[in-house]
Amino acid sequence: MSIDAWDEIRTAYHVARLGTVSGAAEVLGVHHATVIRHIDSLEKRLGTKLFQRHARGYTATEAGQDLMQVAQATDDQFTQLASRLKGRGDSVTGELVVTSIESLSPLLSPALAEFQMANPGVTVRYVTGDRVFRLEYGEAHVAIRAGNAPNEPDNVVQRYATAQVALYASRSYLGDRALPIPEEELPQQKFVGYENMDSRAPFYRWMEDSVPRQNIVMRGSDGRSVKHAIRTGIGLGFMQSWEASQYDDLVQVVEPKSDWAAPLWLVTHVDLHRTAKVQAILAHLKAAAESWTLS
Amino acid sequence: MSIDAWDEIRTAYHVARLGTVSGAAEVLGVHHATVIRHIDSLEKRLGTKLFQRHARGYTATEAGQDLMQVAQATDDQFTQLASRLKGRGDSVTGELVVTSIESLSPLLSPALAEFQMANPGVTVRYVTGDRVFRLEYGEAHVAIRAGNAPNEPDNVVQRYATAQVALYASRSYLGDRALPIPEEELPQQKFVGYENMDSRAPFYRWMEDSVPRQNIVMRGSDGRSVKHAIRTGIGLGFMQSWEASQYDDLVQVVEPKSDWAAPLWLVTHVDLHRTAKVQAILAHLKAAAESWTLS
DNA sequence: ATCGTGATGTGCACTCATGAACAGAATTAT
DNA sequence: ATAATTCTGTTCATGAGTGCACATCACGAT
């Protein structure tokens, strides 16, 4: 039994507040006849007289005063809401959800942390996972995708950076082997792969095609386990160049092939792309990418 | 900077609550195209995207969820308001303002007190005064008027009772005079009158016409002072029979003339006459009048 | 693969709420 | 007293908002 004529309540509110139909009509920007009709309709709807009509104006009955108080509170809340929402569009506050495949985590995490430091009003949520988080369902504000250019409707995609990926091994695995390893000897090496290598990543496609299955001696389901396996010396494996360079015990075994390069894409939803919050994170991510290419 | 489209907020609220435009349209009883237009209009008005649109429905953004919470509270308050007002029309609660000329106070006060005892939910305000309290301004729910039948528009008037008025004097004034005093001797007596006797009361009109002005030795501005003056023995004066009968020292000096009788009228405003509260007080007042004629 | 279902989105005809004009009433000013 | 002002309230023409029909798309089941 809820009321389905909020505008009529709003009209009655201004009539009760000002005391006259004409005054309310002027404030509301409508004709006074409209105000009268709203009041009549609302009174019929509620089954109660809200106003005493006389030639000098409308005076609220008890019911009318009750309604005025409720509507007063409503008007205040709506006004606050409006200024909150208006501000939200132009300021960088609230939640900011970024998603990517898990393997980009070591690259993005520092940049996101920096962004949060620079914008204390925002709480960053960085969600990774195998399943693609869909922007059109509002699951994330911005996604970093790898591989071929995404082609989803209502998504604006920008070329981002190129993930430098190369084949690494630990010194304990290599021993005193000469580097680089000749390309024709690579298939005989032991490898560390990824659990579900049906991913679009081109370097994993190369591994599946070039390396005999029995030589992929371990598969990890996430980046950390793969990284640990390589450092332990189980075999060769792909890693982000940026991440691998942080570990002294890892060495690059061959010059990266050109088709291993995985292009990265910045993807946002059309509706959110214009907002200041999204623009801010995009600018920050691009700036962070500049520093990657330098190192 | 307040929002002037409450109905659109209501529409957006249901969309956010149900997740689909079609569902909201069904609940709201409008076409789904209308819902879409409301959302578009509201988003333009607020300058913020409230929903992520996709083929499976609308999911609320942060802004949309914020709006939903505010609107949820509003809906609750309006629902409570509606049930409150609906109930108020059928129950006898709240304020009840009764007005009359001051001289009827001794008659009405006991009846009003009884009414309040019988209806604890109501707070009775009994206002008396020389100035006529106007029902059309909402100053009172019911008025008891004396004299000629009131003829104001939008007022429903009912014949009530006849105020029994007679001429009284104290035993100290009369001494051992024989009663009743012959009518032709009355003008030579001393009298107690009323301050503003231009009132419509017929017995005061008789006094002005029949008694020489110098014999009206005192005039009171309210009923109590007139009563005290008569009891002190200053002269003859008009009193309500019902009130005078309570004082042993007062005696009726002549048989009441028929044209002294002042008819009483129950007056209510059209808008309030149908309400249960007004009907209750009217019934109670009529019942009280029954007991007067008995005594 | 194909069909079915349930959703959004858009152009067009129409209805209903709105606005303009006028009448009436009461209060205030001259 | 009379005029002027400021309200309410009603009638009628019009336009904005609504409903309808159809197109389109995504997902799921057969």
Image: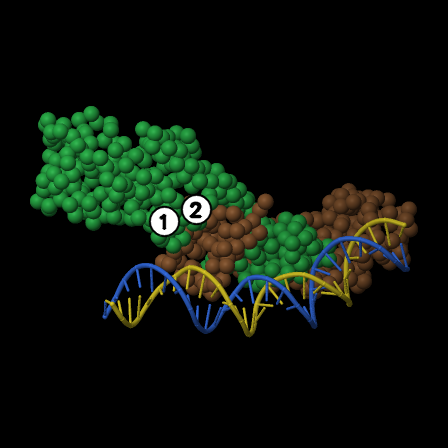
Chain colours: A brown, B green, C blue, D yellow
Could one spot residue B71 in this view of the protein? no
Residue A191, given in percent of the width and then of the height, sits at 84, 48
Horizontal side of D4 relative to A94 (left or right) equals: left
Tag 1: amino acid: Leu
Q: Secondary structure at mark 1?
A: helix
**In the rendered structure, are the residues bearing label 2 and label 1 in contact, judged by CB atoms less than 8 Å apart?**
yes
The one nearer the camera, B142 or A27, is B142
Give the label on residue B272, or none.
2
Image check: B275 left or right of A131? left
Residue ID at (12%, 38%): B185
Residue under label 1: B135
Picture coordinates of residue B176 (x, y %)? 10, 26
In percent of width and height, residue A52 lies at: 41, 52
Q: Amino acid at mark 2?
A: Leu
User: Mark 2 and mark 1, same subunit?
Assistant: yes
In depth, the one of A161 and A131 nearer the eye is A131
Q: Residue at x 11, y 29 (%)?
A: B177
Residue density around tag 2, few if under 14, some if 14–19, many if 20 or more, within 10 Å: many
